[in-house]
Image (spheres, helix red, strand yellow):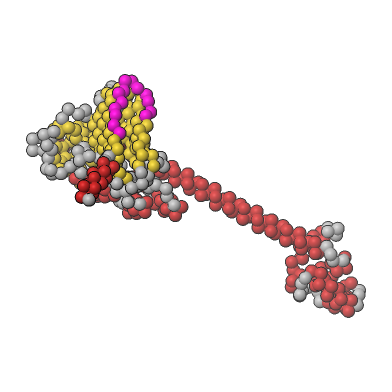
């Protein structure tokens, strides 16, 4: 009986483990729009994300929208200097969300003539 | 000349006067060794820029001394503007924005010419908005940003802030945080905004939106009034037509009698005027009352217009 309980606990723990989405996008004078959707089930405990953006040139915008397309985060990194030149920018965006709206959430990464890199990791923890 | 130099010297000694078109930011921070000993000030041209970073936004920068002190004079306008103070970690570019983590690297503050803003960060604690001080507007800004970071803060709270804030910039920022307002809330915001400077650059979109709303309201009110006037006109038109229809049921003799009655003549005088018997007049009057649905002479007043028109044009 104890073994069964232990087995069930382990099974539960495995199920409670995060669904992880991770990846990176290399940008070379790129003008792109990339969506990174992730599912939030009813009762999802938390969504932890870390997005690191390195922009050497151009502009990178990262936003997070809920299933109703309401933006809950929107960050833009540019590289323009006051003198008309360019300087690198860096953004580190992270949060531990407690999403209330179930459905498909998405990060949108749009770039304009950007050179740099975007690295992302999204952990969805259910129950 | 000496007096002039003395005056200028004194002027520079008096904080807030000597800065002229500048404001001053000073502070003391305790940062661990992972952080660079530098700080940067960006001016936010609009609320949309609060989470935008690029070197072009940096208007002032400086070094942090070994004791953690720093200060800088930066260009400021007569009206309040929104600024961002940020720090960077070793090796990071100057325009680095860190959001959400314990290593959040920035705070916002409001300043205008001659303001003296202060930022404090104690050891072991993250960089926090509450470390900003130096004016009532910044106290209000700190409260607003703290509430805005809380998912449960609703529209009414933001509207209340906009209503009570001494800083229009804070008020506008509060309004910019509202979402899906009810008609009543929209009306309240619209009312609050009438007390705001209509040329505040931070409120350009908001003020325009609510001005549009007001125009829309005006058009709606105008439309409702137009419909009401047309309805009234239609009602009166059809009522008059109905009366005219009844009026035309009278014989020529009965119309003559109504005219005489309306001119103030008694039945006897009518009989004399028309050279008919009094009893005949009485019969005519009873018939007239029955046809027109009236009970007394006073009620005949509503047919005065037809009598006048008949006098002008006997064919009516």
**In the image, is residue A70 above or below residue A119?**
below
Can residue B138 be seen from the camera position used here?
Answer: no
Image location (x, y in percent) of residue B78: 29, 41
Where residue B37 sits, quadrant-wise, is: top left
Q: Identify which residue, B166 or B107, lies in the foreground.
A: B107
Q: Identify which residue, B144 or B294, lies in the foreground.
A: B144
The number of numbered badges drawn on the structure is 0
Residue A83 lies left or right of residue B4; in this view the side is right
Q: Which residues are magenta?
A: A21-34
Q: Residue at x 35, y 27 (%)?
A: A111
**In the image, is residue A54 above or below residue B182?**
above
Q: Identify which residue, B271 or B155, lies in the foreground.
A: B155
**In the image, is residue A77 above or below residue B151?**
above
Of helix, strand and loop, which mostly describes the magenta segment?
strand
Image location (x, y in percent) of residue B33: 11, 34
Image location (x, y in percent) of residue B32: 11, 37
Question: Furthest residue to the front?
Answer: A1
Can residue B156 be seen from the camera position used here?
Answer: yes
Where residue B301 sits, quadrant-wise, is: bottom right
Q: Is residue B142 magenta?
A: no
Image location (x, y in percent) of residue B162: 34, 51
Q: Is residue A22 magenta?
A: yes
Q: Identify which residue, A127 or B38, lies in the foreground.
A: A127
């Amino acid at each position: 009986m104890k073994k069964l309980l232990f087995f069930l606990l382990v099974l539960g723990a495995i199920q409670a483990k995060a669904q992880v989405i991770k990846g990176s996008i290399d940008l070379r004078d790129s003008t792109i729009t990339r969506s990174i959707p992730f599912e939030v089930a009813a009762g999802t405990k938390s969504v932890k994300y870390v997005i690191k953006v390195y922009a050497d040139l151009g502009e990178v915008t990262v936003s997070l929208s809920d299933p109703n397309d309401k933006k809950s985060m929107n960050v833009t990194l540019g590289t323009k200097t006051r003198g008309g030149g360019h300087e690198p920018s860096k953004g580190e965006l992270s949060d531990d969300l407690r999403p209330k709206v179930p459905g498909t959430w998405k990060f949108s990464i749009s770039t304009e003539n950007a050179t740099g890199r975007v690295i992302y990791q999204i952990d969805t923890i259910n129950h | 000349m000496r007096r002039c130099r003395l005056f200028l010297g004194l002027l520079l000694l008096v904080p807030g006067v000597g800065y002229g078109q500048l404001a001053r930011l000073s502070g003391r921070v305790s940062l661990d060794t992972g952080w660079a000993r530098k700080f940067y000030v960006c001016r936010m041209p609009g609320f949309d820029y609060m989470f935008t970073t690029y070197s072009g936004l940096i208007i002032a920068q400086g070094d942090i001394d070994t004791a953690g002190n720093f200060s800088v004079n930066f260009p400021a306008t007569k009206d309040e503007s929104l600024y961002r103070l940020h720090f960077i970690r070793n090796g990071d570019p100057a325009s680095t924005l860190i959001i959400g983590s314990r290593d959040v690297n920035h705070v916002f503050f409001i300043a205008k010419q001659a303001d003296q803003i202060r930022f404090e960060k104690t050891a072991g604690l993250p960089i926090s908005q509450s470390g900003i001080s130096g004016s009532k507007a910044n106290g209000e800004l700190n409260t607003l940003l703290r509430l805005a970071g809380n998912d449960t803060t609703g529209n009414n709270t933001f509207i209340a802030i906009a209503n009570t804030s001494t800083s229009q910039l804070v008020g506008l920022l509060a309004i910019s945080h509202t979402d899906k307002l009810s008609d009543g809330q929209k009306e309240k915001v619209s009312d609050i905004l009438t007390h705001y400077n209509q040329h505040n650059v931070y409120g350009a979109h908001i003020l325009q939106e609510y001005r549009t709303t007001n125009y829309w309201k005006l058009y709606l009110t105008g439309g409702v009034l137009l419909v009401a006037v047309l309805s009234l006109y239609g009602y009166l038109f059809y009522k008059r037509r109905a009366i005219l229809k009844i009026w035309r049921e009278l014989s020529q003799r009965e119309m003559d009698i109504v005219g005489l009655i309306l001119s103030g003549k008694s039945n006897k005088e009518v009989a004399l005027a028309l050279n008919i018997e009094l009893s005949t007049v009485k019969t005519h009057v009873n018939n007239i009352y029955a046809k027109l649905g009236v009970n007394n002479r006073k009620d005949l007043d509503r047919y005065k217009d037809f009598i006048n028109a008949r006098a002008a044009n006997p064919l009516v």
